[in-house]
Image (cartoon, rainbow, N blue to C red):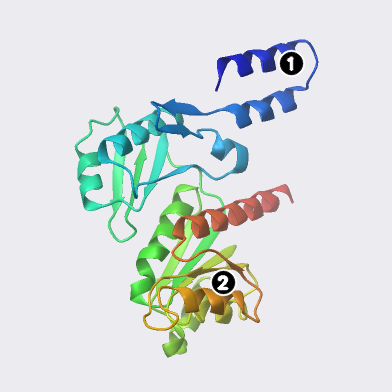
């Protein structure tokens, strides 16, 4: 946060020009941490919108990634890093972490989570389905994010429409979840099928599997966007977005349940 902005804000509050609620809201908007000349970390994002800032590792030099991750960890007590390469994970593992901090690497999801504080108290439940085994890495990215945001997560993989009978026992197991994330490549049919069978909201997650005409996730994306069933759709391979959006829905539903 820029010191001059904070000083002006606090002076306005002390002079009665704004309420306490307005001052808190303004502080959340202004809060960030500079990391040299390369980054401005939005360390108040989770408090502001309920979704933490994540670090996209793709395109970052190992040294810069480490510096950004440690700064984020210092400010918030946890950090999610996505799309981590083998070289980057090696660099992160060589870093001396603060006392009590732990690093968790999910090789399938290509994610790293570093945490020095306990995980957020569990609230809300997310069901994650993957049509094929090739769709699992993106589904796992969604799972890691929803879990780190404090949700209970249930997963079932390899339940695509080529063998639709595999799906129904999974849906019975997930009958009480608050929201579904359904990852599918190729023709991307599974999210529309699930959305036509369950009451909970469904988020379609197209995956860049498939080949030839419509490959790279394009056919899956088009199929989900054209679904007759009602569902929301994120971008191709956007596991973080799907997981975060699902967690936000689940946590809000859990909060409302507590109110009644």
What residue do we see at 52% from left, 70% from top?
A: 174
Nearest the eye: 239 or 59: 59
Q: Is residue 37 above or below residue 221?
A: above
Residue that numbered label 2 is attached to: 175
Q: Is residue 97 left or right of residue 11?
A: left
Residue 29 x, y percent position in the rendering: 62, 31
Q: Is residue 236 left or right of residue 196?
A: left
Q: How far apart are labels 2 and 1 at the CA level? A: 48 Å
Q: Quadrant of the N terminus?
A: top right
Q: Quadrant of residue 144?
A: bottom left
Residue 105 x, y percent position in the rendering: 29, 50
What residue do we see at 25% from left, 45% from top?
A: 88
Residue that numbered label 1 is attached to: 13
Q: Is residue 242 above or below residue 131?
A: above
Query: Farthest residue in the right direction?
Result: 17
- Residue 172 visible from this viewpoint: no
Q: Is residue 197 above or below residue 21?
A: below
What residue do we see at 62% from left, 71% from top?
A: 231
Residue 212 x, y percent position in the rendering: 38, 83
Nearest the eye: 132 or 6: 6
- Residue 166 visible from this viewpoint: yes
Under tag 2, what secondary structure?
loop
Q: Is residue 75 left or right of residue 191?
A: left
* Mark 2 neighbour class, 10 Å CA radius: few under 14, some 14 to 19, many 20 or more: few
């Amino acid at each position: 946060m820029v010191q001059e902005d904070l000083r002006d804000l606090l002076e306005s509050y002390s002079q009665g020009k704004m309420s306490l609620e307005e001052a808190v809201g303004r502080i959340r908007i202004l809060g960030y941490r500079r990391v040299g000349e390369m980054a401005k970390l939005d360390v108040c994002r989770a408090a502001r919108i309920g979704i933490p800032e994540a670090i996209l590792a793709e395109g970052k030099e190992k040294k810069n990634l480490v510096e950004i991750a440690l700064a984020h960890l210092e400010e918030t007590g946890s950090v999610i890093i996505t799309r981590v390469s083998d070289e980057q994970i090696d660099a992160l593992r060589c870093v001396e972490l603060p006392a009590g901090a732990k690093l968790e690497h999910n090789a399938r999801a290509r994610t790293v989570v570093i945490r020095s504080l306990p995980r957020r108290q569990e609230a809300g439940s997310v069901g994650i389905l993957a049509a094929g085994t090739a769709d699992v890495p993106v589904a796992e990215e969604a799972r890691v994010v929803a879990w780190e945001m404090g949700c209970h997560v249930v997963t079932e993989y390899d339940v695509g429409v080529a063998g639709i009978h595999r799906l129904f026992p999974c849906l019975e197991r997930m009958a009480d979840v608050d929201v579904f994330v359904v990852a599918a490549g190729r023709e991307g049919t599974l999210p529309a099928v699930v959305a036509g069978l369950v009451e909970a909201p469904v988020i379609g997650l197209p995956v860049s599997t498939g080949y030839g005409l419509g490959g790279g996730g394009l056919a899956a994306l088009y199929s989900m966007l054209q679904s007759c069933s009602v569902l929301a759709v994120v971008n191709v391979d956007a596991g973080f977005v799907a997981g975060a959006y699902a967690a936000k829905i689940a946590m809000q539903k859990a909060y409302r349940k507590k109110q009644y």
